[in-house]
Image (tube, rainbow, N blue to C red):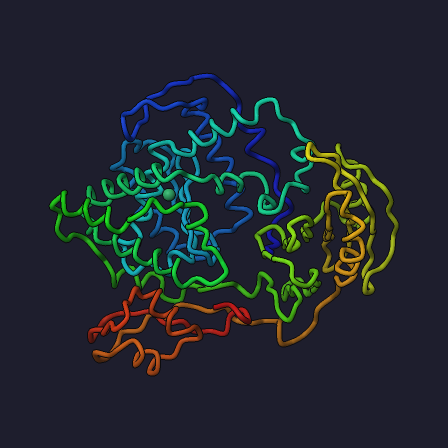
């Protein structure tokens, strides 16, 4: 959870106006496409969502790195079919392997995917792919489809953004990130990305290497699903398709810029940032906010930019911690219960582990039936937090005690061992002599596993590192249990 701003306004649904300009010509492909969204609306929608992404996900704090990524992206966009869009290329402060595009120009790389590139050409392959989603207007088509489905549907769940289902709790414009493109769109973006990177003279082998890294990440990732894979369904044989494109284009070699790229990311944060809070020993602790609480045992948890979330194993109950409006628990409670669609069943002032609080119960009618919830507004560290749990009304009997126990676990946290942990960082090393990965790992230790070192460097089993090569290792203690 990142405390840089108050809760975000709701953007997408309100920002999009319907106007029927049905069959347009796709700028990148020349084909006909179905669209309810004009170019002006496309740009407007993307710029609004961009402000929300910047504010809620947060940009990685390194102006030189941001300028570098933007300059590479701008050069690629300039050779695309839509050079005049308001293009922007930014690195978000997110450890996951992900990249995404918003309509009409904004493109984002997560610092997690930046840590996996080993050359500018590899980065260019992903930037080109995302540019392709924009030039081919994929998200516009998706949104048009989504609008068609939503016309006439007004659920109270939508009126009460706090109660949207788990997974969509990131809020407003961020839901646009979770538009899923189809395999055809993915293949088309790969194709367009290839076009843009080769127009600038990049070695298209960078795309093959990148797809191989993504494949491998799929194989080695344990229980977490990297974002790129959840938002980017595998078009199937991506590596093979990229190799075939290279073969038929007869392009050989080109710009790689490996050392230059690695120098740029030397010192970049790697993995989770302890300052944003983490789960440890069955609790969530936030060292900057000096708070802690427990979610029910066995629930799936997520530390998202604007909320900390948990879902029951049966997926029929959700708990979440967010910042609340107002400067006192009473104000925050009044604000919450005054929302349309929320029925206040009861509320009282109390203290929780010495902190001033208001606890209440509520009911919300949705098109899928009524939800019942418990909510706690609690003041701590000069902020007011809203901690709540909700479930279908028929299940409240099952969860009431569970919710209550979690709400009462909210407490100050002053344990020295969880305060001031340093994040992990990439350290770029020039190997003094030819050596194996194992030998490198011994001579230049990392605070992640050898397998992770292999993956981020793109080394196959048995790889021998040539003398004088720049390679990545990882230093710093990081978040406990983050691999
Ligand atoms: Zn894609």
- Ligand 1, by image quadrant, is top left
Looking at the picture, does residue 364 appear above or below residue 315? above
Q: Which image quadrant for residue 189?
A: top left
Residue at point 66%, 68% (across, down): 282
Q: Which image quadrant for residue 209?
A: bottom left
Location of residue 482 in the rendering, given as x and y in whole percent from the top left corner: 51, 68
Give the tally of numbered discs.
0
Question: 23 left or right of 299?
Answer: left
Q: Which of 119 and 391 is in front in this view?
A: 391
Split into 4 quadrants, where in the image is the N terminus? bottom right
Residue at point 59%, 42% (across, down): 171
Location of residue 275 in the rendering, given as x and y in whole percent from the top left corner: 57, 64
Q: Which of 392 and 350 is in front in this view?
A: 392
Looking at the picture, does residue 424 appear above or below residue 186? below
Location of residue 313 in the rendering, given as x and y in whole percent from the top left corner: 64, 55
Residue at point 61%, 65% (across, down): 279
Location of residue 372 in the rendering, given as x and y in whole percent from the top left corner: 77, 43
Question: 300 left or right of 476?
Answer: right
Residue at point 30%, 37% (across, down): 188
């Amino acid at each position: 959870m990142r405390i840089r701003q108050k809760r975000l306004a709701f953007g997408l649904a309100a920002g999009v106006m319907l106007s029927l300009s049905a069959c347009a010509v796709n700028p990148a492909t020349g084909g006909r496409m179905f669209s309810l969204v004009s170019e002006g609306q496309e740009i407007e929608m993307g710029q609004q969502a961009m402000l929300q992404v910047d504010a809620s996900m947060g940009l990685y704090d390194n102006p030189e790195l941001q300028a570098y990524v933007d300059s590479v992206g701008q050069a690629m966009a300039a050779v695309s079919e839509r050079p005049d869009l308001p293009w922007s290329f930014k690195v978000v402060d997110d450890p996951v392997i992900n990249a995404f595009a918003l309509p009409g120009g904004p493109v984002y790389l997560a610092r997690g995917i930046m840590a996996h590139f080993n050359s500018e050409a590899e980065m260019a392959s992903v930037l080109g792919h995302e540019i392709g989603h924009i030039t081919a207007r994929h998200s516009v088509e998706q949104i048009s489809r989504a609008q068609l489905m939503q016309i006439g549907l007004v659920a109270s769940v939508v009126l009460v953004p706090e109660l949207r289902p788990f997974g969509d709790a990131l809020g407003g414009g961020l839901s646009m990130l979770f538009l899923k493109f189809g395999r055809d769109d993915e293949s088309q973006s790969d194709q367009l990305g290839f076009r843009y990177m080769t127009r600038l003279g990049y070695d298209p082998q960078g795309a093959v290497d990148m797809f191989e890294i993504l494949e491998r990440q799929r194989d080695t990732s344990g229980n977490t699903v990297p974002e790129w894979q959840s938002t980017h369904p595998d078009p199937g044989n991506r590596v093979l398709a990229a190799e075939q494109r290279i073969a038929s284009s007869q392009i050989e070699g080109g710009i790689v810029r490996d050392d230059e790229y690695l120098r740029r990311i030397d010192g970049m944060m790697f993995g989770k940032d302890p300052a944003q809070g983490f789960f440890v020993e069955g609790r969530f602790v936030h060292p900057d906010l000096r708070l802690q609480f427990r979610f029910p045992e066995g629930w799936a948890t997520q530390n998202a930019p604007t909320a900390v979330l948990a879902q029951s194993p049966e997926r029929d109950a959700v708990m979440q911690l967010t910042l609340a409006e107002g400067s006192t628990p009473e104000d925050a409670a009044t604000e919450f219960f005054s929302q349309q669609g929320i029925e206040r069943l009861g509320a009282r002032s109390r203290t929780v582990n010495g902190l001033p609080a208001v606890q209440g119960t509520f009911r919300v009618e949705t098109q899928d039936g009524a939800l019942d919830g418990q909510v706690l507004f609690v003041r701590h560290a000069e902020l007011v937090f809203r901690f709540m749990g909700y479930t279908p009304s028929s299940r409240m009997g099952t969860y009431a005690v569970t919710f209550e126990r979690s709400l009462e676990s909210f407490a100050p946290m002053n344990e020295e061992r969880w305060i001031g942990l340093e994040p992990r960082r990439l350290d770029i090393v020039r190997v003094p002599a030819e050596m194996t990965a194992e030998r490198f790992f011994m001579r230049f230790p990392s605070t992640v596993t050898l397998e992770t070192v292999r993956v981020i460097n793109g080394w196959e089993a048995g790889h021998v590192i040539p003398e004088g090569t720049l390679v990545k290792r990882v230093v710093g203690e990081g978040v406990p249990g983050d691999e």
